[in-house]
Image: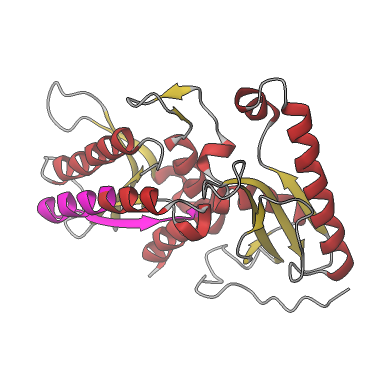
Amino acid sequence: MAKNTMQPLPGWPTTLGMTDTLTYLAEYAPVYWEPIVLSGERITALIAVAGHDGNVLVERVLREDVLRLFYPGQEQGVGAMLEMVRVSLHQHLAAIGSFAGWRPPLTGFFLGEANKTQADVLAAVPAQVAALCASLATVHLAEDVDEEGQAISFSENRWRQDVKTIATTRLARIKDNFSLDFYIAEGARKTVIDYVSARQVINLGLIHASAIKRTLNDTKAKVLDLAALRDSDHLLSNDARYAVMVWRPTEADYGLSDRQLKTVGEAFHQLETEGNRLGIVIKGYSQADKAAEDLVLREVA
C-alpha cells in the first residue's frame, strides 16, 4: 500500500482546544454522476475517504428516498449501478491507498478533486466530508417546487448546521454564539441572526442553481437584517464586522453548466452590490469548512 504523507492542515491554531485533538488525517474526494451523459448536469453520488493509516471508506450520498423520487420503479437498478462504482473505488483505495489512477467502471461517473481534512477518528470523517463537499441538493432532498415548476432540493438549515458543527469542533467556546434571537424594533417580528460575537455578526445565506430567485431573495433579506441590527439600539460592539457568508456552487465542485454558472454569478453580484450599498461584507463559499475557518480565525486573531 502506498504510504500516505499527509500533514496537518495549514492555518489552524493548535491552541484553544482546536486541532491539537484532531489527529486523524484523511484525504477525501466526491464522485459525481451525470445521469444524462454529456448534459453537464452532475450531482454528488459518492464520497470516498482514505485515512492516513490505510483505512478507507466509500459511502453513497444519494439516499433511497431520493432515488425513488427521481427514478420511480428504477431505483433498484440505479442503486445497483451506484454500488458497482462504490465497490470499484473502495477496492482501488484499499489496494494502493490513493485516488490516483482510478477509472470509474461505468460511463457518466467522474472523480472530483481530492482534498485533505482532519478529525478525531476515522468514523467521524464521513459526516464532516458531507459538510465539506456533498451537494446540498443530494444530501437533503425536499419535495419543493419553485416558480418555474422545477423540482428543487436545498436546505439553508444544512448550510448553517455544517458551518456551526465544523466551527465549534475547532473552537468549542463559541457554541452559544450561534442562532441568537433579536427584536430589532418595538413590535417587530423576531429576527434570528446566525452568529453574534464582539468581533463579528454573521448571517449564512445561499444561492442554489435550481432556485435562484427564491434563494437570492432569502439571502438579500439576511443582508437587510444585519443592516437593521447594526443601526438599532442593541448594545453590540461598534468594532464588530457584519457579514453574510454565502454558499454558492462552482463548476469545480458540482459540474454546473455554463448557463447555470452565469446565473449564479449574476445573483452573487447582486448580493455584493446590495452589501456595498449597506456596508455589509458579502463573501462566497463552496465548502462549509472554508466558511468555518474564516469565522474561527477571526475569533482567535
Taking depth in this image into account, of 13 and 85 the one nearest to the observer is: 85
**In which quadrant will I find the C terminus?**
bottom left
Looking at the picture, does residue 231 appear above or below residue 144? Answer: below
60 relative to 136 in the view: left or right: right
Q: Is residue 160 visible?
A: yes
Q: Is residue 172 visible?
A: no
Where's residue 211, x and y in %?
37, 35
Magenta segment range? 267-288
Where's residue 259, x and y in %?
36, 49
Where's residue 102, x and y in %?
77, 65
212 relative to 14 in the view: left or right: left
The answer to if 282 sits in the magenta stretch is yes
At horizontal 79% and vertical 56% (from top left) the residue drawn is 89
108 relative to 248 in the view: left or right: right
Taking depth in this image into account, of 251 and 7 the one nearest to the observer is: 251
The answer to if 146 sits in the magenta stretch is no
What colour scheme governs how the chains and residues are painted in the rendered image of this protein? secondary structure
At horizontal 57% and vertical 38% (from top left) the residue drawn is 138
At horizontal 77% and vertical 69% (from top left) the residue drawn is 52
Taking depth in this image into account, of 207 and 194 the one nearest to the observer is: 207
